Amino acid sequence: MKLVLVTAVEEFQKEVLKIFKKANIKNFSSSDIDGYKNSPELLMASSWFSGEKSGNESRMFFSFTEKEKIDDLFKLMEEFNKELKTNNPLKAIVLPIERFI
């Protein structure tokens, strides 16, 4: 059993759901997150008291699943990222699970 975390900009939510389905990962969760890049322009433009939201609306998906399904997920994500015309690829990490109940 492993934990896989996937992040994507909000616009790719439907595509990520399709990728999870193709990888046969049926049980997962998701959460809204804000994505940031620490570029000098962003840091100079941000203000401590700024009322504007400067992050990108993103989604984080996570699932406790088997390694074989994660391997399929990564292959599908790599294919998706190769066809992207934006600078917002799908990203993922895998963490080992030592114990669970």
Image: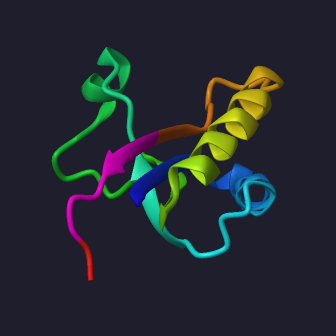
- Toward the viewer: 84 or 99? 99
- Residue 63, placed above or below residue 93: below
| Whole-percent x, y for residue 10 in the image | 63, 55
Location of the C terminus by quadrant is bottom left
Q: Which span is picked out in magenta?
A: 93-99
Instruction: Report the residue at 61% width, 31% height from top.
Output: 88
Instruction: Report the residue at 45% width, 52% height from top.
Output: 5
Horizontal side, residue 72 vs residue 44: left or right: right
Magenta stretch: residue 59 in it?
Answer: no
Query: Is residue 54 visible to us here?
Result: no
Instruction: Report the residue at 78% width, 53% height from top.
Output: 15
- Residue 45, placed above or below residue 14: above
Magenta stretch: residue 98 in it?
Answer: yes
Horizontal side, residue 39 vs residue 76: left or right: left
- Toward the viewer: 41 or 61? 61
Horizontal side, residue 8 vs residue 48: left or right: right
- Residue extending furthest top? 40
Location of the N terminus by quadrant is bottom left
| Whole-percent x, y for residue 84 in the image | 78, 26
Query: Is residue 42 visible to us here?
Result: yes
| Whole-percent x, y for residue 42 in the image | 35, 27
- Residue extending furthest left? 48
User: Could you say which quadrant of the image residue 71 lies in?
Assistant: top right
- Toward the viewer: 83 or 55? 83
- Toward the viewer: 59 or 43? 59
Instruction: Report the residue at 38% width, 39% height from top.
Output: 36
- Residue extending furthest bottom? 101
Disc tally is 0
- Residue 8, placed above or below residue 65: above
| Whole-percent x, y for residue 45 in the image | 32, 29
Figure coloring: rainbow
